[in-house]
Amino acid sequence: MSRVRRAPGLLLVLAAAACGASRPVGSRQAPGPTASPREASNILRSDYVGSARCAGCHADIAAAWQRSPMHLMTRVPETARVRAPFDGSVFRFKDDSARLTQAGGARFIELTSATGGVHLYRVTRVIGGRYREDFAGVEVAPDGGAVPSARPGAELILPVSYMFETRSFRLKGYSVMVTERPGLRAGGVWNQTCIFCHNTVPYFDDIWGALHGPGAPGYQGEVVDRLLPPGARLPLAVAPGRERELVSAVAAEVRTVGGTGELPDDPAQALRRGIHELRGRFTAQHLIEVGIGCESCHGGSRAHADDPRVLPDFAPRAPFLNPAEGREVTRAERINRVCARCHQVLFSHYPFTWEGGQRRGDNPGGSSITSGEARDFLLGGCARRMSCVTCHDPHGEDARADLARLATPAGNRVCVGCHAQFAAPEALRAHAHHDPAQAGGSCVACHMPRKNMGLGYALTRYHRIGRPDDPVRVERDRPLECALCHADKTVRELVGTMERWWGRRYDRAMLQVLYGSLEARPLEATVTRGKAHEQAVAIAALGEAHVVAAAPAVARQLVNPYPLVRYYARRALAALRGADCAVDLDRPTAEIAAAVRACVPEAFAGSAPPVDRGAPRGADVPDED
């Protein structure tokens, strides 16, 4: 089930297959030439039936899905396979520590803080499972009983991540672009932060802010459109004359989560009140199911399960929603928007995006970290004809070798399905100006460069499909994307070649500001002058290219103001030196700097440790991972 070549049909088959009890287990049926009826409603709580109802007809898909990391995004620890060692292992962070233990079938994390004292938490949720595990838990007394608390019974996000790649712990907050944290403490309330994307909820609950419009109270329910350019949006709206039905639906959901009282008749006021109620009252008992189920993507499918002739629909539907969208929406676009319900994140209030954008601007660029891929894809040029499932298996775990093959000339067959003019080797040579049989002949290598920070310690591909010679990227972002492969070239050499090959003209003054000199090598200049997300890319690329001369500059980034960048610097420095400096990144920055000086004396020769060049004052806010 993990073959990416089969992926384009998998999601479509599930959407079209029958679920009637009379159909043999595992059978599939493609729709006939006559259009089948679609579900009239697929977002309300009453529209959902749960994944178990799907398994009767889709046994093979359901079996693969049960094993997939996405389905297992949230698990209860009593029945989950947990990879983190709850065997008395201790994670030390600065002057604090976390001790992981297990007793009586339960798992515990004890936090000992120099400033916060000792707190014991029983783990209630295990989150993630492909690259790392995170945890949520409730505070308990040493004997396992309840404790007096300002938030009694609240499941809190715990500050420990277990990284599979290194089999080590990391501060959970350092999974995203936040600045240095002083110690270990339990964070936000689980059911008020990460519950919606990591579990199955009625999609109706997600869209209240969108239906309200500007000025809606903030909560975890989001839709992607506010992060898209106006021309790419598909705004949700209430059908004229159906406002009362919307208010009734909101009131029903508020009652389900334990709210009381009448809602105002005015839809905007009702939505505002509903959002406050939902934010405070939605708990695990209100989930459709723990983890990501079939209906997280396919929508509430009760009508389809009851009558297989009624097909699921990726478009959100309800009697009170206005179906008029103002333009044709392709099936691929619909699928991409389903993925973008969760994979749209610009994490942690880090202020900068790709394309020189601002997260809080009217038109933010692409994300620089994993979990924004689908929204980034919608920003690119292929999102109307190509969907996420073209490359990714939506029902299982992608085979890493298959994904890697997509970034070779063998993977070009995905692209030439639409861009047939580049199928012939000589046509591709003329277009790419590289040997079509070598790495430079890969469509993905140039149009989806590795410039995003992954959930582990390696770069992943930027999913906004575009061109490396795009003036917006060349003149606003560092490093030049061509430098990711051509680390030995100067800014002048690279832009001169790009201008000659593709007929562009670039503003030399803007490039001078970015790199300090046109004779600079983009990767090395980016490490010194770039924003934090740009530095991480340049650091990783220098390590992979084994540019030994860059070791002192890379070593300085072991005290980068954004700790996530430090992990990339440590890995790159080990590659450049052929040995690990054994710098403990869980110590205070002053101690890290001293360790760097001892290992790479030239790192700070004649200079102080680097200061933050990227974060404006006030940008540091609580974690949003």
Image (tube, rainbow, N blue to C red):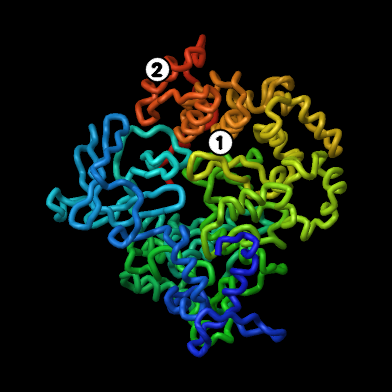
Q: Residues within 10 Å of mark 1 (few under 14, many from 20)?
A: many
Q: Count the marks: how many?
A: 2
The residue sitting at 56% across, 40% down in the picture is 459
Q: Residues within 10 Å of mark 2 (few under 14, many from 20)?
A: some
SS of the residue under disc 1: helix
**Sequence order check: which comes first, mark 2 or mark 1?**
1
Give the percent coordinates (x, y) of residue 572: 53, 29
Give the percent coordinates (x, y) of residue 149: 20, 51
Tell me the residue that label 2 is attached to: 594
Residue type marked 2: Ala
Give the percent coordinates (x, y) of residue 361: 59, 44
Residue type marked 1: His
Give the percent coordinates (x, y) of residue 152: 22, 55
Q: Quadrant of the N terminus?
A: bottom right
Residue 515 is left or right of residue 500, and the answer is left
Q: Please identify the residue farthest to the bottom as the structure is shown.
A: 22
SS of the residue under disc 2: helix
Residue 43 is left or right of residue 115, and the answer is right
Of marks 2 and 1, the one in the foreground: 2
Q: Are marks 2 and 1 in contact (CB under 8 Å)?
A: no
Is residue 272 something one can see in this rendering?
A: no
Residue 305 is left or right of residue 138, and the answer is right
Tell me the residue that label 1 is attached to: 533
Residue 447 is tagged as none
The residue sitting at 67% across, 46% down in the picture is 448
The residue sitting at 27% across, 41% down in the picture is 89
Towards the viewer: 550 or 368: 550
In the rendered view, would you say 423 is above or below 596?
below
The residue sitting at 33% across, 32% down in the picture is 182
Towards the viewer: 612 or 518: 518
